[in-house]
């Protein structure tokens, strides 16, 4: 599904179901150098169980046009533009890593429009090491290898998100290379990392969030370890925490665990 957002095409995967205005909506937001496909199990399940699903490619990534966001705030404005374009009064937001900060900022800027906030593999501040920042700019293929080593635990059991025989690290590397190549004008890898590293509004944003918040954290996460999310957890008004035996790539290392956490969280009261 292609939606015009602020004059540029934004792609949203709908889980194979048409958009129905009468149904509740959940928006999935990916992290740095990912796309909508990282949510394939969770988005498809919800699309077939009463939800409108909009798993987006951020602007300038994958199938979306426009300028890649240079900040969390830029990306948040695009999420609100998506809701405006489809006349969605209120939606649940689910974000991973960089996407979790985007979802947080959106819920803070427009609390009346967000029913649930789920932050997967999150941290605040979400600082990026100088070595990784430099590699993402000057040696992006090396940086992709570095990120994938840091993002996956050594205990991730088969089968993975796509079934027996899937190679988690290889699949993730291929996705990141594809997303990097999708925008020859801008290095979306480095730009995304700079946006994460420079975001300094997390605690203020969480103070403005009015909806329930779910934190899905990986006990073995080296990129955003659970302790790095605690400043947000403490400030969340209706916070819930689920820890999974996974690294940073939670949706592929423990797809069922992420899905079950979202199922419970999004269940009507």
Image (tube, rainbow, N blue to C red):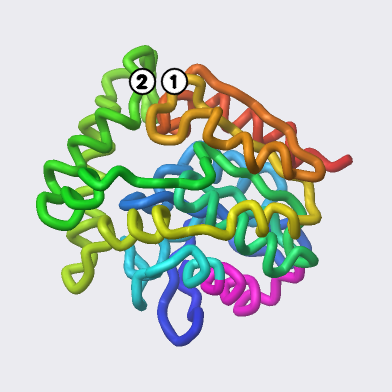
Q: Residue at x 72, y 48 (%)?
A: 50
Are circles 1 and 2 on residues that touch, CB within 8 Å? yes
Whether 241 is among the magenta residues is no
* Span highlighted in magenta in the image: 77-89
Judging depth in this view, the residue of 201 and 27 nearest the camera is 201
Q: Residue at x 47, y 43 (%)?
A: 39
Gap in Å between the C-alphas at discs 1 and 2?
6 Å
- Mark 1: few, some, or many residues within 10 Å (few <14, many ≥20)? many
Residue receiving disc 2: 153
Q: Residue at x 73, y 33 (%)?
A: 240
Under tag 2, what secondary structure? loop
Secondary element type, mark 1: loop
Horizontal arrangement in the rendering, residue 247 relative to residue 216 (left or right): left
Residue 80 is left or right of residue 148, and the answer is right
Q: Position of residue 94 (x, y in %)?
A: 59, 48
Q: Quadrant of residue 215?
A: top right
Foreground residue, 69 or 180?
69
Quadrant position of residue 54: bottom right
Q: Give how far across and how far down residue 29 sits, in percent.
A: 50, 54
Q: Which residue is mark 1?
A: 220
Neighbor class of circle 2 (other Cα within 10 Å; few <14, some 14-19, many 20+) is many
- 54 or 112, which lies in front? 112
């Amino acid at each position: 599904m292609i939606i015009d957002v602020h004059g540029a095409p934004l792609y949203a995967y709908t889980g194979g179901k048409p958009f129905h205005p009468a149904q509740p909506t959940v928006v999935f937001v990916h992290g740095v150098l990912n796309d909508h496909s990282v949510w394939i199990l969770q988005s498809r399940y919800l699309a077939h169980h009463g939800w409108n699903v909009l798993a987006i490619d951020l602007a300038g990534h994958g199938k979306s046009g426009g300028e890649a966001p240079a900040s969390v705030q830029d990306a948040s404005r695009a999420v609100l533009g998506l809701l405006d374009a489809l006349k969605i009064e209120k939606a649940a937001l689910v974000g991973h890593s960089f996407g979790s900060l985007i979802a947080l900022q959106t819920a803070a800027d427009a609390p009346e429009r967000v029913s649930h906030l789920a932050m997967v593999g999150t941290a605040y501040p979400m600082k990026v090491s100088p070595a990784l920042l430099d590699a993402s700019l000057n040696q992006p293929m090396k940086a992709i290898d570095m990120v994938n080593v840091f993002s996956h635990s050594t205990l991730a059991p088969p089968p993975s998100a796509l079934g027996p025989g899937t190679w988690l690290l290889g699949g993730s590397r291929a996705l990141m290379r594809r997303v990097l190549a999708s925008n020859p004008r801008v290095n979306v890898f480095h730009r995304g990392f700079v946006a994460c590293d420079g975001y300094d509004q997390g605690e203020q944003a969480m103070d403005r969030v009015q909806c329930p918040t779910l934190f899905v954290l990986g006990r073995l996460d080296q990129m955003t370890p659970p302790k790095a999310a605690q400043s947000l957890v403490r400030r969340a008004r209706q916070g819930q925490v689920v820890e999974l035996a996974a690294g940073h790539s939670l949706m592929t290392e423990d797809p069922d665990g992420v899905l079950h956490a979202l199922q419970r969280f999004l269940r009507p009261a």
